[in-house]
Image (tube, rainbow, N blue to C red):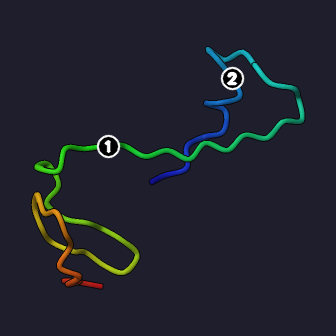
Amino acid sequence: MEERNAQEVLEFQGISISKPKVKGFYPAFDLASPELISVFITTAGIEKGSNRKKGSGKIVSR
């Protein structure tokens, strides 16, 4: 998950589409096929695994 630039939801082709004092928030995430995922990277560390239905809960590095 990431937070993208608020201008992406407040403008279209460089033209403002909102009121001047409006603030934007644009959280976003990408979807990937499970077979393309080899590790999970989190603030707790890295969990290795490929195409698993359930995590092992084993963190391999911090």
Residue at 88 percent across and 29 percent down: it is: 20
| Residue 27: image location, x then y, percent | 56, 47
Front residue of this view, candidates 29 and 5 = 29
| Residue 31: image location, x then y, percent | 32, 43
- The image quadrant that residue 61 belongs to is bottom left
Q: Are marks 2 and 1 in contact (CB under 8 Å)?
A: no
- Give the number of the disc on residue 11: 2
| Residue 37: image location, x then y, percent | 17, 55
- The image quadrant that residue 49 belongs to is bottom left
- Measured in 3D between alpha carbons, the distance from the residue under mark 2 to the one under mark 1, in whole angstroms, is 25 Å
Q: Going by the picture, which residue comes out furthest to the front?
A: 53
Residue at 13 percent across and 63 percent down: it is: 52
User: Up-down: is 13 above or below 43?
Assistant: above
Is label 2 in a helix, a strand or a loop? Answer: strand
Front residue of this view, candidates 48 and 13 = 48
User: Up-down: is 19 above or below 47?
Assistant: above
User: Up-down: is 46 above or below 39?
Assistant: below
